[in-house]
Image: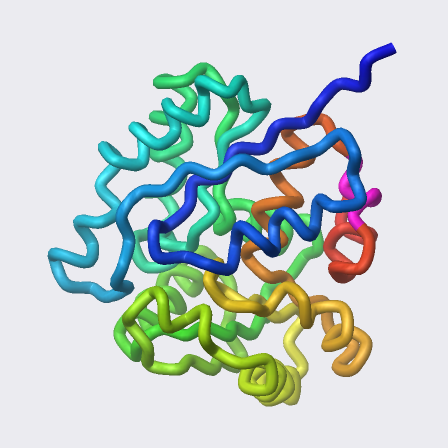
Amino acid sequence: MTMKRLLLGMLTPSSNTVLEPVTSAMLAGLDDASAHFGRFPVTEIALSDSALAQFDDTPILRAAELLAHARMDVICWNGTSSGWLGFEADHELCRRIEAATGIPACTSVLALNEIFDLTAVKRYAMVTPYTDDVQARILANYAQAGYECVAERHLGKRDNFSFSEVDADTLRGMVREVASAKPQAISIFCTNLRGAPLVRELEQEVGIPIYDTIATAVWKSLRIAGGDVKRVHGWGSLFQEVA
């Protein structure tokens, strides 16, 4: 009997070098699951008109339609833009992807919010590479949705490629600093940070669930495709403990 394949489509910022290898590594132990990537232009994370225009739906939908040619089971926007654009931007993007392709859609951020709700998280901490104004916008959107940020750290960066060059010790330090505020959960909020490979060790160290936004994309995509997220081992409590 032929095993049903789980084909996970990932919409990827063009300057991102982290989410593809990390996503593929997460799925490496699942013989029936594979991730497939479509890129569209994103080089800068800022609140300027030119930076915000990168998230216009037109090129994103074009990338989604190309993924649809390969008969994906799900198409996920593996990025965090609705953190500063507003969560409705992701809801609308999912609606448009589904209308254009007939394939269920999800996003990293909406998955994170779902995980917060499933685990009754209201007090969280956040680690990002972003600038002061982008970080403030993200925290304001979460506050408006009823989530309290009790600690945050950000690096003041705007060049998307530079996020991928943040070293592991820097990320460990940021997570340890926000953990001291004793949040219910910590989010590593950027899909071009190498946070996901550190989650298991840091969760064991600080004793707090850590939800990386590459991991949330994989978690939700697998669920939509009909896969068992508990088969993903070594990437933290999300895959083993969040039903």
160 left or right, relative to 21: left
Furthest toward the left, the residue is 49
Identify the image quadrant of residue 229: top right
Q: Could you tell me which residue is drawn at 52 percent across and 24 percent down? A: 104
234 lies left or right of 74: right
Give the x, y percent position of residue 115.
Answer: 64, 51
Instruction: Give the colour scheme of this rendering.
Output: rainbow
Say left or right for 214 vs 198. left
Residue 220 lies, in percent from the top left, at 62, 40
98 and 7: which one is in front? 7
Q: Position of residue 63 (x, y in %)?
A: 35, 32
> In terms of secondary structure, what is the magenta stretch mainly?
helix
In the displayed structure, 25 sits above or below 167; it is above
Q: Quadrant of residue 194?
A: bottom right
Let me know if residue 124 is in the magenta part.
no
- Residue 181 visible in the displayed image: no
Spot the residue most to the top. 1
Tell whether 99 sits left or right of 70: left
Q: Which residues are magenta?
A: 228-232
Residue occupying the point 55% across, 28% down: 74
Q: Is residue 223 above or below residue 53?
A: above
Position of residue 207 relative to residue 1, above or below, is below
Task: Tell me if residue 179 comes above or below residue 235 in the rendering.
Answer: below
- As for residue 231 lying within the magenta part, the answer is yes
- Which image quarter holds the N terminus? top right
Image quadrant occupied by the C terminus: top right
View extreme (right): residue: 1
Q: Residue at x 68, y 57 (%)?
A: 120
Q: How many marks?
A: 0
The residue lying at 51 percent from left, 63 percent from top is: 147
Q: Is residue 135 visible?
A: yes
Estimate the x, y position of residue 128 in percent, counting from the top left: 45, 72
